Amino acid sequence: MNYWLIKSEPHKYSWEQFVKDKQTFWDGVRNYAARNNLKAMKKGDLAFFYHSNEGLCIVGIAKVVKEHTPDKTAKEGEWYGVDFAPYKTLKKAVSLQQIKQEPFLKNMELIRLSRLSVSKVTDNEFNKIVLMGEDNKSTL
């Protein structure tokens, strides 16, 4: 299994709306690195759902339920989307500030490639953030 992080501005598409919808097609990605990450996702992979611009925090975990298919919102080029379903709401949101303050997460793509809307997450990063989302004090 691989782990990822997907970003959404909460005023455009929030975790709460995602939970209500029960599933969504993640479209509109127009960055080549993010597109390649979408193409690499496999059914069953998990992705952190990150509220960008407002909130700046990881609020939940989504699961890939259907691998990449063409993004019909694209007017030109090869762009793809992935179907996600909500998997788990974190007990406590994990803020960008908390992530930046955690030395163990200093190389996370969320920090190093901050403008990337779909990024990779290592197994250890994923496990650490899940622990932080349980009580916001955990350390490895």
Image (tube, helix red, strand yellow):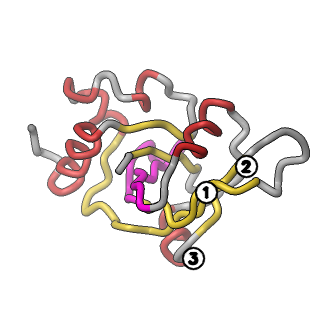
**Distance Cα–Cα, label 1 vs label 3:** 15 Å
Q: Which residue is tagged 1?
A: 82
Q: Looking at the image, which residue sits at the far right?
A: 75
**Distance Cα–Cα, label 2 vs label 1:** 11 Å
The magenta region covers: 44-61
Is residue 64 found left or right of 81 in the rendered image?
left
Mark 1 neighbour density, 10 Å: few (under 14) some (14–19) many (20 or more):
many
Q: Amino acid at mark 1?
A: Val
Image coordinates for residue 35, horizontal then vertical, percent? 64, 39
Residue 50 colored in magenta in the image:
yes
Q: Earlier in the sequence, mark 1 or mark 3?
A: 3
Judging from the image, what secondary structure is the residue with disc 1 in? strand
Q: Amino acid at mark 2?
A: Gly
Image coordinates for residue 21, horizontal then vertical, percent? 57, 76
Q: Earlier in the sequence, mark 3 or mark 2?
A: 3
- Disc 2 versus disc 1: nearer the observer: 1
Image coordinates for residue 84, horizontal then vertical, percent? 53, 63
- Disc 1 versus disc 3: nearer the observer: 1
Vertical side of 76 occupied by 97: above or below: above
| Residue contact between numbered discs 1 and 3, judged by CB atoms under 8 Å | no
Q: Which residue is tagged 3?
A: 21
The residue depicted at 20 percent of the width and 24 percent of the height is 103
Vertical side of 32 occupied by 83: above or below: below
Q: Amino acid at mark 3?
A: Asp
Residue 75 colored in magenta in the image:
no
Q: Earlier in the sequence, mark 2 or mark 1?
A: 2
Q: Which residue is tagged 2?
A: 28
Q: Which mark is residue 103?
A: none
The residue depicted at 38 percent of the width and 59 percent of the height is 60
> Residue 100 is drawn in which quadrant?
top left
**Distance Cα–Cα, label 3 vs label 2:** 18 Å
